[in-house]
Image: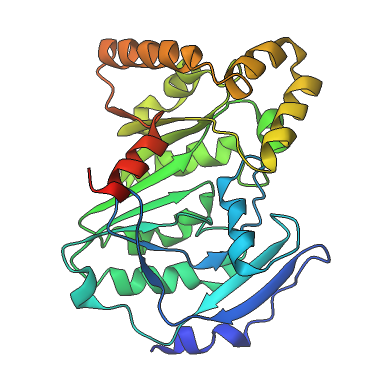
Amino acid sequence: MNNETNNLTDQKPVIPANKKVTLTEVKDYVTKSNLPSSDYVINPYVGCPHGCKYCYASFMKRFTGHREAWGTFLDVKTCTKPISRKRLRGKSVFLSSVTDCYNPYEEQYGVTRQILTQLAEIDCSVSIATKSDLILRDIDLLQRFPHLTVSISINTADENFKNDMDRASSIADRLHALKVLHEHGICTVLFMSPIFPGITDFREIVELSAAYTDEYWFENLNLRGNYKEVILSYIADQYPHLRELYGEIYQKGNMAYWEHLAEDIEAYCGEHAIRHQNYFYHEKLVKNTKSGQ
C-alpha cells in the first residue's frame, strides 16, 4: 500500500465539538451491491456530515451501533488490502450508496482519492454520486477513467430550502461543479432527488443546468422511519398549503401525484430531446433485482 494510505492516521484534522470522527479498519473497501445499476459498491465512510433530513441511509445506525444523531458522527474507513483488479475487471462500481464520498472530511483524509487512484488502474466502469463540489479537487484523476459517470444531486434552486434540508455544498456550487466536470469531458448527470411534491420545480432546474448536463435522473421523495415525521412536520410548518397533498401521498398512499408528474417529465424531456431516467419506482426495481426478476 502506498505512503499516502499509510499516512492516513497521521493527519490531525480539527474536529468540531458536535462531531464524532473515528478511524476504523475494514477488511475490504469493496462490497457486493444490491442496487440494480451496479455490481459493486464502495462506501469510504460510515455516516455523513451533510446530515440530510430525508436521508434513507440513516438506517445504518441499526447496524453500526451509533447512538448519535445522523449527521453528527463519521467513521473514516482505512484498509491495508489492495482493491482486487481481478474481482472488478469488467464490472460496474458505485461510490457511494450510504454516505457521500466527498463529504467535508474527505479533504482532510483523502480516502476517496486513494480508492479512485486504485480504481483508475482497473478496467471497470465507475459511477460517483455526490452533493459536494469537493469532487473538483480530483479532476486530474477522474479524467483517467474511460468509463466514468458523475451524478450531482440537486432538487431545488432555492438555497434557503436546501439549507433547511442539508449541510452539503450550495446549489450554486453544485451547478458549477457540473459545469466544470462537463468542460473536462466527464459524463455528467443531474440527479433530481428527492423530488419534493409541490416544491421541486423540475423545469427550472433543467433550464439552469441543461448546457452542461448529459443526462437527468429523477427520483421521488420516499418517507419512512424516523425522518417521515420530521419531514411532514417541516412541511406543515413551512409549507402549510402543501399539508393536504403530503397527507394524501405519505399517509394515504395516493400515487396520483407521481403518476401525473412522471407524465409531465416524459412529455417535457421528449419535447426537448433530454436524456433521462425515471426512478420513481426505485424500490420496485431493487426488489425485482434481489428476486432475480
21 lies left or right of 107: right
**Horizontal relation, residue 105 to residue 273: left or right:** right
Q: Is residue 37 visible?
A: no
**Relative to the observer, which residue lies in front, 190 or 277?**
277
Q: Is residue 252 visible?
A: yes
Quadrant assignment, res 18: bottom right
Q: Position of residue 129 (x, y in %)?
A: 43, 49
Residue in the image at 47% along x and 44% along y: 177
Direction right: furthest residue? 17
Above-or-below relation of 175 to 169: above
The quadrant in which residue 280 appears is top left
Quarter of the image for the N terminus: give it: bottom left
Q: Is residue 91 left or right of residue 142?
A: left
Q: What colour scheme was applied to this rendering of the protein?
A: rainbow
Quadrant of the image containing the C terminus: top left
Relative to 235, residue 115 above or below: below
Please provide percent x and percent y for residue 224. Answer: 60, 38
Foreground residue among 193 and 122? 193
Compared across the picture, whether 223 is left or right of 279 comes to: right
Q: Please, is residue 267 above or below residue 212 in the view?
A: above
Q: How many marks?
A: 0
Q: Position of residue 83 (x, y in %)?
A: 32, 78
At x 41%, y 38%, the residue is 283
Q: Position of residue 262 (x, y in %)?
A: 39, 17
